[in-house]
Image (cartoon, helix red, strand yellow):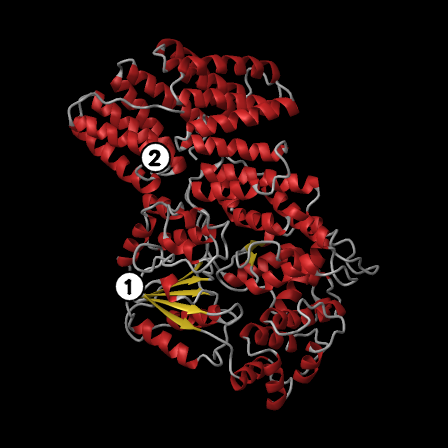
Amino acid sequence: MDVLAVVGTLSGVAAVGVAAWQARVQARETIRRRRAEPGVAPGMSVAPPTGAVPELIRGRDQVMRRLRRWLRKPPGAVVVLAGMGGAGKSTAAAALARHAARPRQMGRPRRVWWVWAADPLSLAAGLASVARQLDAGPADLEAIATGAADGPDRFWELLSRAPSGWLLIFDNADSPEILGGSRTDAVRNGLRQAGATGVTGTAGSDGTGWVRPSRRGLTIVTSRDADQETWGRHARVVPLGRLGEADAARALRDLAPGAGDEAQARVLARRLGGLPLALHLAGRYLRSTVVHCPTFAAYAEALDSDGGLRLLDSSGASDRSVVTRTWEISLDDLARGGVPQARTLVRLLSCYAADASIPLDLLDGRRLSSLFPPEPAGRAADHPDLLLEHGLRGLERVGLIDTGSPGRERALTLHPLVVETNRLHLREMPARSAEPDAALVRQVAVALVVGALSGLRVDEPADWPRYRTFGVHLHALLGTAADHLDPDGLTALLRSTWATVRALDASGAHDVAETLNRAALAHVPGPDHEAGLCLRHQLAWKLATRGEFTDAELMFSEVGERRARLLGDDDPQTLTTRHELAWVAGCQERWAEAEARYDLVLDERRRVLGEQHPDTLLTRFERGWSIANQDRFEEARTELELVLRDRARLLGEAHHRTVGTRHELAWIAAKQGRPAEAERLYRHVLDDRRRALGDEHLSTLTVRHELAWVLARRGRSKDAAALFAEVLAVRRRRLGEDHPDTRATALALDRLSQGREVDARHLV
């Protein structure tokens, strides 16, 4: 299979459109981003979000003193700031980050990094960005970004060489197993198990995962999980609870000094339960320009009123209910102030991943226009981008979204508790005149992501960062929207997920790809669903790449039979599955059968698609591979040289399929007894693979393994052994001891050490 081995008043705002909004956010952040390396997670700013942090964190004096002391003299333990959602864990961490970044009396400024740890993709992107700042080489970046088994070791080796005194913060680690390292069931299922906690030792803070103790710098984690067993014996768990009444009242008066006196602030503080997030949102609202309840007393009265409030918990006893009432007041007043679309936007944004960056360019005003309420004549009725901008500014003003932190270039985030309760609104609240239509909100949320991905190519390395950015949001949509979509909307979501899975596999993020694949399959409405068959086809391919050929062949056969019955024998999708059945037969060295199957597929593809179609060329290429493996090398070489000519003309010399054809010709040269020519060809292919994919991508490793085989055939046993050893070490770290590729390299090295003939098990 020739596929790479696998993100003033609001009404007075000038009508400058969403592009100006994006430019304003970008200018304020002043971030310079570097282009992500091929095959590596996309770049993400790891600057701490300190812009909105108050100078004084009320009620946290003792905690902040301890944190500053540990910053000066690291305790050799991971510090975990733990507490309920909205307790101010991230605020305390950001305040420490701001303190750490200030110039010191002696020595260099401290290096401070903020890594979002809510999901595997955000974590990988953040860790890769830290590694770049630590001058990591391509191999380190590849291992760290793709979650290789040795990724944590490489990351901490880089940190060990950094100047001491650094501060590393892992924020929103509510699923601690994600921090535990790689190649574990918890990591492999990290996206699917988001929110699971309480797994003993999952965070790996005893020295095996991404979070480790150090005396050269301080590692901070923020999490809802306060269980000491989760974090291990080398962690110090610092609980953060509600604020006392006096501190809570002072926090309110800091935010809105003109809203009332101390006694009134205390009443409101009690009503808000001392929860920092609720206090922050109330204070931001009271100092905003769209205030219907301008005082502490009026705000407290509104909290206890049913007038227009959409409440989830009529008892008012839960933390969620308190916070929900707080921002519903803000949304009501935004609507009264001429920004009713703010409520719709926050419901829409809650469909995406909690506390993960949502790119601003995702929010296409044209697709959002169906959600926005009709505007009076002359008030931007024909300008959905302007309505979007007004809505975003309103939400930012009352504190419901964050766009101004330097950790979010051209992106926005919501607090996880805001996301959680807004999702409940979409699920549980009856339709009201002020409430957007939940079905339409979900439909548009999906359409935005589908549209953002529609112009990308799964086999184009330059597009992989975009796929990675949206992978976590696709997974969230599977949970928040998939079961509520009409058939067309569900199909669009599943097809975009399938494309993203293929791109993730191609980039090397195999575990995350499989997790996303299986999550999508859980929402397929039936065994004959077209997108479901695509997902099952991809999963079968994944199984085959791991050497699980029997299960893969059974799955391919089932998919092929269903496609033939539903689509017809000559449908391109049916032919694709039959092509893969030929490939998996070749993988099991049933070469004559593979050739016969390829012949049948080739005849059909020539008839249906034409001689020069890329899929026809693919079958011609793999048919040549099956012929070569029957020792008919000259026949295979003649056919593959024609394929190379056609691919170079149609796809370009640098396209991965063109390079793959040259790879096959190099192998044939070696098998025909032309090792000098083979070495030259292999080195050209290796240069191309390294340039496009990096040194440790699985496709690059295959070329390196076979180059070592050629060196052995030329009698350069020492050079061959050294190269085999390099490949074996990487494959063990990336794939594990039991992967077929690892075993093949180990066997080759063992045979070479015994002076026995070495051969290469060659798959495409």
Q: Calculate the distance from the C-alpha at mark 2 to the C-alpha at mark 1.
A: 33 Å
Q: Residue 370 has which mark?
A: none
Q: Quadrant of residue 756?
A: top left
First along the sequence among labels 2 and 1: 1
Query: Quick one: quadrant of the C terminus?
Result: top left
Which of the two discs, 2 and 1, sits closer to the camera?
A: 2
Quickly name the residue at label 1: 214
- Disc 2 crowd rating (10 Å Cα; few below 14, some 14-19, many 20+) is some
Q: Is residue 655 visible?
A: no
Q: From this viewpoint, which residue is outermost toward the right?
A: 377
Is 319 on the left or on the right of 153, as rendered? right
Residue 722's place in the image compared with 553, above or below, is below
Q: Say which amino acid is labelled 1.
A: Ser
**How many dots with numbers?**
2
Q: Amino acid at mark 2?
A: His
Q: Which residue is mark 2?
A: 739
Res 192 seen here: yes
For numbered disc 1, what is the local secondary structure? loop
Identify the residue shown where x is 53% and y is 86%: 246
Residue drawn where x is 51% and y is 77% of the image: 242
- Looking at the picture, does residue 201 appear above or below residue 267? above
Residue 213 as seen in the image, left or right of residue 648: left
Where in the figure is residue 578, as x and y percent of width and height? 53, 21
Dot 1, how many residues are within 10 Å of its Cα: few (below 14), some (14-19), or many (20+)? some
Instruction: Residue at 52% x, 45% y: name it.
Output: 466
Q: Is residue 618 above or below residue 702?
A: above
Image coordinates for residue 51, horizontal then vertical, percent: 50, 69
For label 2, the SS is loop
Q: Nearer the viewer, residue 342 or 76?
A: 76
